[in-house]
Each structure stands twice: as C-alpha cells, then as structure tokens.
C-alpha cells in the first residue's frame, strides 16, 4: 500500500504537527510505503521510514507547486492521500488536486477547526479562507481524522462533514523512560509552543496570586514562539514582580526535553484549544502528573487519577497549583505510574500506526469497518 501524507511544515517551530509526523512515519512507514510531501524549512525534524518530497510553497509559485504535486501523484500512484492541517491554501488545494485525479483523501485538521481557532481573526482571516477554499475542502474530504472525541463533536457541530474517525496522537514508548525518582525538585514545567492559544497569560496571573506559597519554586517555560509575543509575556511577568519564579529556556528537543519532563514535579498546559496535545502524552509517559485545562480533551487525567483536568481560569489554575505542590512525594509517584500505564495502554505509536493502516484498508474496501470510524446518515460511506 502506498500512502502520501502532505504537511505544510516539518520544521521544529511547527510544534506538535511536526512531532506527530515524525513519530507516525517511523511506525507507519514499516506497514506501508510512505511518502511525506512538504516544503523546505530551516530546521526540519528527522523523518524516518518515509520518502520526503518538497513542493514550492510561495503563492507566486502556486502553479509550480500544482505541477510538482500532480507529477508526484502520477509517479507514486498512491492508494490514499492524507492531508495534515487547515487554513494554508495548499492544504486545501493538494486535497482538491488529488481528488480531481481520482484519489481518495483524508483530512486531519490537527485542532485547526476547533471553535477557539475559528473565532481567532474570524472576520479578517477565517471567513475569507472558508469562502475561498477551506469549507469546500472539509466538505469534500472522504474522511475527517480527529484525534479525540471532543474534536469529533466539535466537527459535527461545524456541520461540514460527518464522516469522521478518531485516532489519537501517539508516542514511541520503547525509547521513553519513566522517571526514577519523585523527590520534589520545586519545578513546574510548561513545554509547548509559545502562542496566544496556550493560555500562558493565565498561568502568569495565577502564579501572581499564589506567589507566597511558591517560594523556592521555578516555573520553566520551554518552547518557541514569535519574539514580540514572548517579550510581551516577559513584560507581564516583570510588571507583576515574579521574574524570580519564571525561567524562559527556549525550544528544547531530544534528551534535553526528556530531562525537563523527568525533573519536573508537575507539568502544566493551560491551553484555550488543543485537539490532543502530544506534550501531555510525553509528560505522562515520563511519570510526571499533568495539569491540563478543559481546552484540551484530557478528562482521563481525572478518571485515571494521574493529574488534573480543570476549568481554564486564573482562580482555578492558582488553586490547582496550590493543591499539586502540597501533595506528598508518594502521591506524585502513584500518579506518575498511573499516567505511564494510561499512555502504554492507549497512546503508543505502534497502536496508532496500526489503526491508521486499518482506516486506509477500510476506505479502500479491503477490510471491515474499524470501531473508531463514525458513521452518520446518508454520508456514512467510504
């Protein structure tokens, strides 16, 4: 089986989407002949077990990209095309060109069709994009790939396409170890893209409320973001006189990233919108309890007692941080072990890759319908 994944960027700065492609390709590429089509960038992640192809990415080179894409389709003759992302015109047009050539296409929005995202720059960016290309792309996709039940429900509310499957993000557990000690380090970790949707301002304001109980604590902010926005966060911290608590360390990768997860008492992600959150999977796999807002689909933190799934407001974040840092080390250990087991059972990349192959086989009429495929009304077809 030959599969093409189109993704606008595999650069480190693209965060979770690049990480997803890196992890997925390593396992899916063992099951199918995998081709990843993207655009050149300065710091691409390493992609294993897939052939990488590059398209022109400038609007001035739009027709050049079309010819390159059509040639790839002709040369590879894939069984399926999987489009990663929305709002970039080439996400919609590569899907359209593939379908015009007779290929079936799956669209994974990566959370880009969540309500908070659609409302951001709604009239200036989203409405024109929906009108010009994005709405049609969603409507005509053979299937929409969501990564969580909550994202599926939001997609159904959107009303553009009710052919939806749920396959979560995954992680490579065999090279990821659980921490060996839960002795308190007085470290709280935020690790993700630094972006307005991540709710870092809420965390800053919450810390200001409880600074008296955070004596000796460090809150590490790890991740990349636009320089002006990062500076605005630093200015906010300075205005609230909490510079001694926060430490911005920039983007971290590889062993440095896992060291941060292992060294943290607690991980926090106060996001407004998240369709999955690979960083939450990574934190739990490391044995670190997580505090995650209800902007992300992580109710399992509560049901599996490995963290806190909370309302996303300053008071709730402040009170949850106070509760978390007051826990004894033995409770950290038990929560950490439960979190690791949750990831092992449900979020290993091997399981995710197998589900992806099952989905392709079913859409192509080669297998029975998987249980994670949703069907509704007259649109319940391949």
Image (cartoon, rainbow, N blue to C red):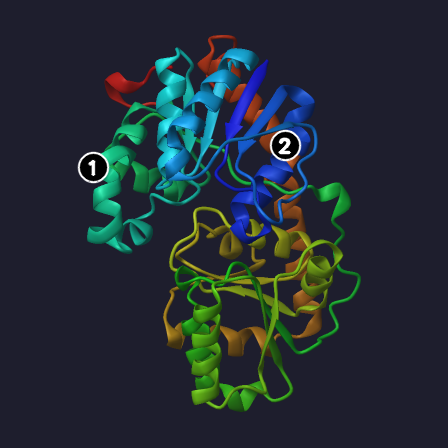
Q: Nearer the viewer, residue 310 or 128?
A: 128
Q: The N terminus is located in which quarter?
A: top right
Please say whether residue 318 is visible from this viewpoint.
no
In the rendered image, the residue lying farthest to the right is 180
At 47% from the left and 63% from the top, the residue drawn is 226
At 38% from the left and 64% from the top, the residue drawn is 311
Q: Secondary structure under badge 2?
A: helix
Q: Is residue 381 left or right of residue 224?
A: left
**Of callouts 2 and 1, the N-terminal one:** 2
What residue would you read off at disc 2?
A: 25
Please say whether residue 88 is visible from this viewpoint.
yes
What residue would you read off at disc 1?
A: 131
- Tag of residue 83: none
In front: mark 2 or mark 1?
1
Where residue 292 sits in the image (x, y, percent)?
A: 48, 61
Q: The C terminus is located in which quarter?
A: top left
Q: Nearer the viewer, residue 243 or 301?
A: 243
Where residue 5 sits in the image (x, y, percent)?
A: 52, 28
Height in image: 18 above or below 134?
below
At 57% from the left and 54% from the top, the residue drawn is 279
């Amino acid at each position: 089986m030959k599969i093409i994944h189109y993704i606008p960027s595999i650069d480190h700065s693209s965060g979770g989407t690049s990480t997803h492609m890196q992890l997925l390709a390593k396992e899916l590429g063992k099951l199918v002949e995998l081709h990843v089509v993207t655009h050149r960038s300065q710091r691409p992640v390493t992609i294993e077990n897939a052939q990488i192809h590059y398209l022109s990415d400038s609007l001035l080179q739009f027709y050049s990209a079309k010819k390159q894409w059509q040639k790839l389709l002709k040369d590879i003759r894939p069984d399926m095309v999987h489009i990663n992302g929305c709002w970039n015109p080439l996400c919609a047009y590569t899907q359209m060109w593939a379908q015009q050539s007779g290929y079936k296409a799956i669209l994974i929005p990566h959370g880009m069709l969540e309500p908070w995202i659609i409302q951001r720059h709604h009239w200036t960016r989203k409405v024109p994009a929906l009108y010009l290309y994005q709405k049609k792309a969603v409507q005509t996709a053979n299937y929409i790939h969501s990564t969580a039940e909550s994202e599926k429900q939001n997609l159904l509310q959107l009303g553009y396409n009710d052919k939806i499957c749920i396959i979560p993000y995954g992680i490579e557990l065999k090279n990821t170890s659980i921490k060996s000690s839960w002795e308190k380090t007085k470290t709280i970790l935020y690790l993700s893209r630094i972006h307005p949707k991540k709710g870092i301002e809420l965390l800053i304001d919450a810390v200001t409320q409880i600074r008296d109980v955070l004596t000796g604590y460090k809150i590490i902010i790890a991740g990349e973001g636009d320089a002006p926005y990062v500076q605005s966060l630093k200015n906010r911290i300075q205005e609230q006189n909490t510079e001694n608590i926060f430490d911005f360390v920039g983007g971290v990768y590889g062993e440095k990233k896992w060291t941060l997860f292992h060294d943290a008492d607690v991980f926090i992600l106060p996001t407004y919108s998240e369709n999955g959150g690979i960083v939450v999977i990574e934190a739990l796999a490391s044995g670190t309890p997580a505090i995650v807002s209800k902007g992300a689909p992580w109710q399992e933190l509560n049901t599996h007692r490995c963290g806190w799934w909370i309302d996303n407001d300053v008071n709730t974040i402040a009170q949850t941080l106070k509760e978390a840092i007051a826990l004894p080390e033995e409770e950290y250990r038990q929560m950490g072990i439960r979190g690791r087991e949750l990831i092992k059972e449900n979020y290993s990349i091997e399981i995710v890759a197998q589900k992806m192959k099952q989905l392709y086989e079913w859409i192509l009429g080669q297998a029975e319908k998987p249980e994670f495929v949703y069907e509704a009304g007259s649109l319940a077809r391949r």
